[in-house]
Image (tube, helix red, strand yellow):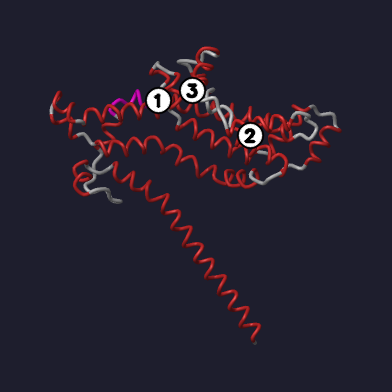
Amino acid sequence: MQAVHSEHSVQKSKKHGQIALHVFFILVSLCYILPLILMVSVSFTEENAIVSGGFSLVPQPFSTEAYQLAFRNPKQLIDSYKVTTIVSFAGMALHVFVMSIMAYSLSRRNFALRRVFTFLAFFTMLFNGGIVPSYMVWTRIFHVVDSYLALLLPNLLMNAMNIMLVRNYYKNSIPFELVEAAEIDGASELKTFWKIMVPLSVPVNVTVGLFTGLAYWNDWINALYYVDDPVYYGIQNFLVRMMNNIQFLSSGNAAAMVGSGMASLPSTGIRMALAVVGVLPIVVIYPFLQKYLTKGVIMGAVKG
């Protein structure tokens, strides 16, 4: 009887622990979700209501003035989306390809220089040459200015953390016996990589691709440093430029020059509307890739 009572107490304690854990994760989720809801709500709120009453989860009164201002020049917005989409997908594919080949080399036991290249990869995580040397190398030696290459190659093409993530996935999640069997059958290194490693490493490649795609999508530094032609401005640069224009037109100096009507522009609402425009594609795509992201991070993070 006492044993039954003790078992019941343990089960009850476990149930309470699970409830507490669920409540904790719900609260953590709300900390991430509520700012997004607030951002959307403020973007649909009149500027006067924001100034007088502050932010609210429900737009009162409802207004689309900020979005009308954001989409006043739809062609330029569409062109910016096009540039960002091309750069994000091209950069993601190129990054995954180059990084996977290097990670595969570092995971091979018979590669004599794998420790040297592993050290060099870790070294880049600790130190870098700085902005000025990088700028001089890319502009004076490689001449990647005012082109898609200027948006693709600097800063984001390689990432040592992603290399280590994929290398660990190759070492811990893909049986080495498969590679040995391919070698016995006479497969070359490239064929082994393409026919065995790539199909079996979809989760980690999707994970790294998502991280890289997000980095390219949110990047505006490369365009700031290496691009002068507005044709190559992505969505982030377009939003930054529009925000600078709105901030100037809402300032007291602009109001004195062009009239008081400019000072009443929805400066806060337009900020939120532009943020919604920037993050909406990512929010839509992420749920479809979530299962690969979780598996890739967990398996790639195992030390090997």
Q: Nearer the viewer, mark 3 or mark 2?
A: 2
Q: Tell me the residue that label 2 is attached to.
A: 122
Q: Check disc 1 and give the amino acid type.
A: Ser
Q: Main secondary structure of the magenta part?
A: helix
How many neighbours does mark 1 have within 10 angstroms: few (below 14), some (14-19), or many (20 or more)?
many
- Quick check: 234 above or below 165? above
Residue 26: where, in percent of width, then height? Answer: 45, 58
Q: Position of residue 109 (x, y in %)?
A: 78, 35
Query: Quick one: which residue is furthest to the right in this view?
Result: 184
Specify the amino acid type for callout 3.
Answer: Leu
Closer to the N terminus: mark 2 or mark 1?
Answer: 1
* Start-end of magenta stretch: 72-77
Give the distance between the C-alpha atoms of the residues marked 3 and 2, in whole angstroms.
24 Å
* Residue 293 % position (x, y): 57, 43
At x 48%, y 16%, the residue is 147
Q: Residue at x 27, y 48 (%)?
A: 55
Tell me the crowding category of disc 3: few under 14, some 14 to 19, or many 20 or more residues within 10 angstroms, Cα based.
many
Instruction: Report the amino acid beneath label 2.
Output: Phe
Describe residue 63's horizontal placement relative to residue 297 as left or right: left
